[in-house]
Structure formats: structure tokens, C-alpha cells
Image (tube, rainbow, N blue to C red):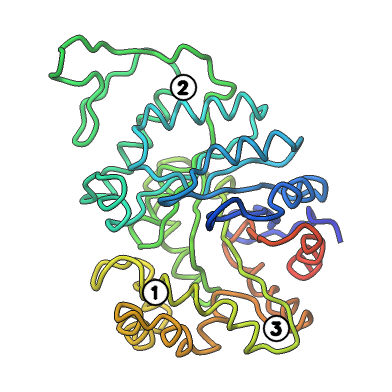
């Protein structure tokens, strides 16, 4: 079945499609990523995505791999806001948009204090206000209506002080598009609403169909605050969806459990782990607390082992192909517009068959 086969979703009347996500690098580039992205382009996948945290960056591999494609959109999931000033991110976005012929999607996010303060050496407080200011500057730079002058709580352009020689500047290049799509990585209720208010798409990390109504309400709050009539009709929700086919459901779930243990238990610190809060909202706070205790004590394998199958099945598709195909139907009924899948090139057509019906 063609990967571009689509289904409508009720809130925004958008279509469900497939994207390819290369994810983070381990010790080096993910094996077969170029071949997989080329195959995704050939099959009619909507988009291809890269990521960054505190290793490989998102832009360089996206440009490298994207140069071998013709149609597929190229997105970052996500660019770390703390890694670049708004001007540097806007420059990269305009450059990528020119080189790709208008196929670039700027996915960005605030990340968490562990990475922001530990790796990038930047302060983390007030991430929502910082995000709003950051996105506003980027849009102003890309529109290129005039020299940029911004004096906000977090960013000062031109900088007041220093050599006192700064002046408002306008980008030397004309944008390929004056409106480049901006997606926001978000998990908390206020951040999800902010994505709907000021951005063009939302990038959840973990999502459960049973929480769909809750997320739709957060999105509606953002659409209302945006003041843009009909924004929900163009808004996109792209979710990395783990799919592990196999005859033994528990063994398939074992491939997912270490990742859930890392994010629910090992990211951030007690009381400052947004991923933990996502699973708590799903009804797994007791499990997440035990996972966190074990993980922070260095017992990573044990932490993964106590994650129940139902928790895995809430956020991933695992088991026999018929089971995955049946369960995918409820995912297509949610606010999601794009399933982002990973894996080797030969698997991509199978994903299309399993996920799109």
C-alpha cells in the first residue's frame, strides 16, 4: 500500500501520513539512514526528521541526507533553542529552505534543565516565555520586512552594552518563503497550548490515544489564543511512533521498555522530569516513581523490567502484524496528522501497510 495513503481527522480535517525519523546518533551515524530516507522519499513519505540533544546536531545530517531527496519535507525534531540564538536559528532555517527548494520544517524546543544548563550553559527558567520570544524573533527575521530591533526579557537586538556599536540589521538573503513552518516540541499542558497558539505544528515525544481528548482541549486553547480563524485546519501533529512487530508481544515490548525507563526515570531529576509527568497523567505515576527510584540508583535493567505491558502498549505498537494493524486504527482517530517511524529501508513499505490500513 502506498505510504501517502491518507485518512482525515475530525478536529483539523488534515490527513494522516507517514514520516521517517532518524533520531539521535549513538557512537556514530545510524546505519542505513541515508538509504532509508531515500526510500521514504521514493515511497511518498511526507517528511524526514533528525534530532539533537548533546551529541550530533540536527541540521548537518538533515542537509547531507536531504540533498539526496527530491520531494520529501525535511524537519528537525528538535533543534535545541538553547544551542543557538534566534538569529542563528533563523539563518539556518532560511539556508535550509533555499537549499531544499522550500521543503524545510523548523522543529524546535526548550528541552529540559539537565541539557540546557548542563550542556549548553544557559539558564532554563521561564521556558514558555523564552519560547514565545524566540519564535517571534525568528518569524520577524524570516519575513524580512525591515531591520530587526528587539529588546525583550531574554534577547536583546542590538545588544545594549559591549562595544555599543550594534545596530538593527536585516538578513542579507531574501527568504525562499517568508513563512517557514515552525513546529514545537512540547509535553506539558501550557506548552502544548503554546504550540497551537504561535506555531504551525506540535511534536509530542510520547502520546497515548486514550489521552487524545485531553490534548485536543489543550490545542483548542492555543487555537483560540492565536486569533487565527481556522488555524486548526492547517495545524500538524507529528508523533514519533515506535513499532515493533513480532509473534511474542512481551519480547517486542522488551525492545521498548529501556527507552521508557530512560525517559520516565532517568531524564532530569526528581520533581523536574517532564516525561515522568506525561506518564503520570496517563495513570502510571506509581510505576514511574518505582522506575525513577531504580534508574537513579543505577539499576537501569531492573527499572525497565518493571514497566508493564499495558504502559508500553499505550505509547507504542508491539506484537503480531494483525494486532498492530488493528490497534493502529485508534491512533488514526486521534489529533495526530503524521506518524514518524524509524528503521531500515526494507521496513518502510511494511509500516505503510500496518499503520495506514
Whichever of labels 2 and 3 marks the residue nearer the N terminus, that label is: 2
Q: Give the residue at x 44% y 57%.
A: 220
- Position above or below: 170 against 19: above
**SS type, badge 3:** strand
The residue singled out by tag 3 in the image is 319
Mark 3 and mark 1: span between their CA atoms? 22 Å
Q: Which residue appears at 55% of the width and 37% of the height? A: 60
Q: Is residue 67 found left or right of 164 in the rendered image?
A: right
The CA span between labels 2 and 3 is 47 Å
Q: Which mark is residue 143?
A: 2
- Res 238 → quadrant: bottom right
Q: Closest to the observer: 167 or 193?
A: 167
Q: Quadrant of residue 83 in the image? A: top left
Q: Position of residue 176 (x, y in %)?
A: 59, 21
Total number of numbered labels? 3
2 or 3: mark nearer the eye: 3
User: In front: 167, or 35?
Assistant: 35
Residue found 41% across the figure and 76% down from its top:
279
Amino acid at each position: 500500500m502506498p505510504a501517502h495513503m491518507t485518512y482525515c481527522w475530525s478536529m483539523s480535517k488534515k490527513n494522516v501520513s507517514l514520516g521517517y525519523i532518524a533520531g539521535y546518533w549513538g557512537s556514530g551515524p545510524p546505519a542505513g539512514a541515508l538509504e532509508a530516507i531515500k526510500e521514504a522519499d521514493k515511497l511518498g513519505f511526507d517528511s524526514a526528521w533528525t534530532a539533537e540533544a548533546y551529541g550530533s546536531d540536527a541540521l548537518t545530517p538533515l542537509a547531507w541526507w536531504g540533498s539526496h531527496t527530491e520531494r520529501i519535507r525535511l524537519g528537525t525534531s528538535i533543534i535545541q533553542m538553547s544551542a543557538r540564538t534566534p538569529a542563528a536559528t533563523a539563518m539556518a532555517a532560511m539556508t535550509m529552505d533555499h537549499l531544499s527548494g522550500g521543503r524545510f520544517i523548523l522543529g524546535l524546543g526548550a528541552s529540559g534543565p539537565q541539557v540546557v544548563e548542563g550542556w549548553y550553559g544557559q539558564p532554563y527558567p521561564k521556558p514558555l516565555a523564552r519560547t514565545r520570544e524566540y519564535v517571534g524573533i525568528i518569524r520577524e527575521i524570516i519575513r524580512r520586512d525591515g531591520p530587526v530591533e528587539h529588546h525583550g526579557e531574554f534577547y536583546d537586538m542590538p545588544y545594549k552594552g559591549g562595544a555599543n556599536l550594534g545596530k538593527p540589521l536585516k538578513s542579507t538573503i531574501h527568504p525562499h518563503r517568508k513563512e517557514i513552518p515552525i513546529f514545537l516540541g512540547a509535553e506539558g499542558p501550557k506548552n502544548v497550548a503554546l504550540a497551537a497558539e504561535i506555531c504551525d505544528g506540535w511534536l509530542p515525544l510520547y502520546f497515548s490515544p486514550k489521552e487524545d481528548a485531553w490534548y485536543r482541549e489543550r490545542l483548542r486553547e492555543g487555537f483560540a489564543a492565536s486569533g487565527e480563524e481556522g488555524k486548526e485546519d492547517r495545524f500538524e501533529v507529528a508523533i514519533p511512533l515506535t513499532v515493533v512487530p513480532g509473534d511474542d508481544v512481551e519480547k517486542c515490548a522488551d525492545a521498548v521498555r529501556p527507552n521508557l525507563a530512560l525517559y520516565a526515570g532517568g531524564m532530569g531529576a526528581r520533581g523536574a522530569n517532564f516525561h515522568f509527568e506525561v506518564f503520570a497523567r496517563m495513570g502510571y505515576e506509581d510505576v514511574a516513581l518505582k522506575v525513577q527510584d531504580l534508574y537513579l540508583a543505577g539499576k537501569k535493567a531492573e527499572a525497565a523490567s518493571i514497566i508493564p505491558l499495558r504502559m508500553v502498549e499505550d505509547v507504542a505498537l508491539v506484537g503480531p502484524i494483525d494486532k498492530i494493524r488493528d490497534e493502529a486504527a485508534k491512533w488514526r482517530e486521534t489529533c495526530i496528522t503524521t506518524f514518524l517511524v524509524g528503521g531500515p529501508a526494507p521496513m518502510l513499505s511494511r509500516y505503510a501497510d500496518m499503520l495506514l490500513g
